[in-house]
Image: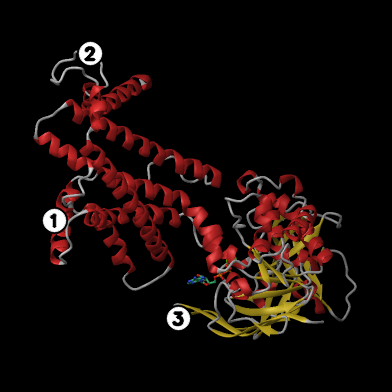
Amino acid sequence: MKSLRHRLLFAYAMVVLAFLYIPIVVLVLYSFNASRINAQWSGFTLDWYISVFQNRYVLEALYNSLTIGLIAMVVSTILGTMTALALHRYKFRWKGAIHSLVYLPILIPEIVMGLSLLVLFSQLAIPLGKLTVIIAHISFCISFVIIIVLARLEGLGREMEEAAQDLGATPWQTFRYVTFPMISPGVMAGALMAFTLSIDDFVISFFVAGPNSTTLPLYIYGMVKRGVSPEINALSTILILFIFLVTVALVILPERFRNRMGDKKTQRQMPF
Amino acid sequence: MKAMIELQNVEKEFNGQLVIPPFSLTINEGEFFTLLGPSGCGKTTLMRMIAGLEIPTRGEILLAGSPVSKLPPYKRDVNMVFQQYALFPHMNVEENICFGLKMKKVPLHEQQKRAEEVMALTELTEYRYRQPKELSGGQQQRVAIARAIVNNPKVLLLDEPLGALDYQLRKHLQLELKKLQKDLGLTFLYVTHDQEEAITMSDRIAVMNKGHLEQMGTAHEIYHEPKTRFVATFIGENNILCQGDYCYALRPEKVNLHDPAIALEKTSTYRLYAGVVENVVFQGTIDKVFVRLREKDFDLPVLMAYQYFDDKRRWRPGEEILVGWEGPDAVKVES
Ligand SMILES: Nc1ncnc2c1ncn2[C@@H]1O[C@H](COP(=O)(O)OP(=O)(O)O)[C@@H](O)[C@H]1O
Ligand SMILES: [Mg+2]
């Protein structure tokens, strides 16, 4: 009885995974297809990858994506961590309201976010370009960083910090030697999350990007308009691989850290 | 005797609610001083105010003669052992112990020397490279103490440091802690809700109830001369005998049990009352004998007495009995 149920559950899980991954697998396979026409398989080739990397526009888009992703990651991690610390430590009047405001950007449809940012930038007469994309990415990444770091802080309690102060640590030393090392798995997870979200983003970038700020997703979209080519498959495969590696890091690194910290309560899990 | 800690009318309110009414207390240098009281009576709050983790609403705290209530915790020469130890999980035993010295920028060789001494004293040398999670409860507790005393504080504050440990280990560590305090000559302020622990370890005990001081004195005084009904019943067991406005506390071990058939020689101070055995409870080294008194003038229908086994006989429920005690053994208490 039990083993039958087990097997059914396993089969079900496999079906769901297949549903999720078959389109991606097909795309990856065709990126190695020698034929230019997607529909039929005519042998293995790396030509499309070579041509992608010889394409000046692709390289520029990749460069844009990485710089925007890195800057958005660093800024949103710093701002988000500081906000989380403030929300955690201080009691103030509208704390509850601010807490829920943090979640809002995650729940608002991206298209609305993108549109409102576009309106904002044109009101302020800021020319669309890398700067506007970076600002937009920071604004939606911060929420994720805050939530991840806050979760970590909540598990920490005040006692460690009090013990540090009692042993003679100034507020800065307390942060430097106790608070920060203890929340750093959360900060790291938040940073990686911000980076992937930025690299991934299409909708918001679509609204706020200018002439010299085409990111990879935007470039791929532009190519698709001219028909699906094997180069697109190759480029998408690279993007998928990249995101996959960051995701693995996101799961494994904080876990490593946590083990070192001797934190038995938190289990292996994605940040949320 | 030099005063190490003086609390002068210290008060604490949380959200407008008075948790500690004006509280005054003096703790002497080198003393093992215990705050004893039921949980929720404000012991931790009082201790946190001395450590600087809470700010008194009113009043002043003196440490070795100088006022400290405006100083942040890291500028006070006291260290605290937290109830849950609060060891830093990302540091090993030695790093935990050196933390305070490192923060105060003590030279490295001096840090090493003092850490070695303290680890030897607390028998932690062999565990120096372990993480806190790799230690047993008792070992973690020793790290918490080592981490505090390595700073040579003027006072060590201990908030129910043995509360999380099992009975046997607690008994053992009570003696160890007391010995450590004697050897180092340190002033200990110890918090517990366990009256047995307080009596075993302390030079002086302050019994607290609902934020105020009920009685202060040596363990002997607190046990044998309770001033209030609360102290009499909180520490050990007591019979409270009330006659009109006056109440007396009578320890069950001071009550003698007599067979009515055997004639007694009475002294002028000896009190004797007739009753019936209501219940006998076996407690290992003693029997607890509950006697229903015939006279109703005590406001206490059932009196408890301890009967040791090397005594004459064992009582059975329903037997006629005489209970007696020396008059001075019933101590007058405020109700
Ligand atoms: N930070 C706080 N905010 C509000 N009330 C508190 C706070 N800390 C303690 N109290 C209250 O103060 C009283 C005494 O608490 P505490 O000092 O922890 O008692 P004890 O240590 O004797 O068990 C309790 O009623 C508790 O609810
Ligand atoms: Mg307490």
Q: Quadrant of residue B208?
A: bottom right
Instruction: Determine the CA span between mark 1 and mark 2.
Output: 44 Å
> For the residue marked with disc 3, what is the amino acid?
Gly
Q: Nearer the viewer, residue B129 or B244?
A: B129
Q: Is residue A117 visible?
A: yes
Quadrant (top left/top right/bottom left/bottom right) for the N terminus of chain B: bottom right
Label 2 beta carbon within 8 A of ligand 1 = no
Q: Subunit of mark 2? A: A
Instruction: Report x, y in % for residue B279.
Output: 68, 58
- Residue drawn where x is 52% and y is 54% of the image: A181
Instruction: Report x, y in % for residue A171.
Output: 53, 68
Q: Quadrant of residue B191?
A: bottom right
Q: Is residue B133 above or below residue B157?
A: above
> For the residue marked with disc 2, what is the amino acid?
Gly
Label 1 beta carbon within 8 A of ligand 1 = no
Kindly identify which residue carries mark 2: A43
Considering only order in the chain, which callout, 2 or 1, is on the residue closer to the N terminus? 2
Kindly identify which residue carries mark 3: B16
Instruction: Report x, y in % for residue B60.
Output: 61, 85
- Residue drawn where x is 63% and y is 81% of the image: B68
Q: Nearer the viewer, residue A268 or B3?
A: A268
